[in-house]
Amino acid sequence: MKFLLEVTMDDARLTEDPAGELGRILRYWGGNLHHYALEPGDGSAVYDSDFQEVGRWRIEATAGA
């Protein structure tokens, strides 16, 4: 399986403080993963600190898995 996280970096918050905002996103969503089975097909939208959708994370099956 693969864990994939995609974040659009041209969002207003991310252009103001990219490292700080990405760190917050990783901490928040990393801490929230226990609510998911983490199986292929699981995923969720990712939001910045203004609650604007800036991306998604998802679990994908890998070839042969």
Image (tube, rainbow, N blue to C red):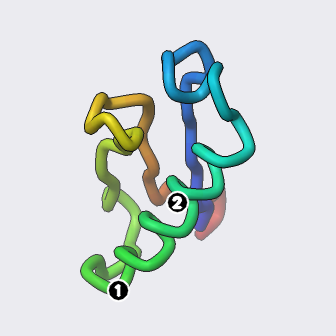
How many numbered dots are placed on residues in this image?
Answer: 2
Badge 1: few (under 14), some or many (20 or more) residues near its Cα, within 10 Å? few
Q: Quadrant of the N terminus?
A: bottom right
The amino acid type found where label 1 is placed reads His
Q: Quadrant of residue 45?
A: top left
- Residue 34 x %, y %: 35, 86
In primary-sequence order, the first of circles 1 and 2 is 1
Residue closest to the eye, 1 or 11: 11
Q: What residue is drawn where x is 51% and y is 27%?
A: 13
- Residue placed furthest toward the bottom: 34
Residue under numbered circle 2? 61
Instruction: Tell me if residue 44 comes above or below residue 28 in the rendering.
Output: above
- Residue 19 x %, y %: 74, 44
| SS state under label 2 | loop
Residue closest to the eye, 51 or 45: 51
Number of the label disc, if any, that sits on residue 34: 1
Disc 1 vs disc 2: Cβ atoms closer than 8 Å?
A: no
Badge 2: few (under 14), some or many (20 or more) residues near its Cα, within 10 Å? few
Q: What residue is drawn where x is 44% and y is 33%?
A: 55
| SS state under label 1 | helix
Instruction: Tell me if residue 33 comes above or below residue 60 in the rendering.
Output: below
- Residue 21 x %, y %: 58, 44
Instruction: Tell me if residue 60 comes above or below residue 15 in the rendering.
Output: below
The amino acid type found where label 2 is placed reads Ala
- Residue 58 x %, y %: 44, 52
Q: CA distance from mark 1 to mark 2?
A: 19 Å
Q: What residue is drawn where x is 35% and y is 75%?
A: 32
- Residue placed furthest toward the right: 19
Q: Quadrant of the C terminus?
A: bottom right
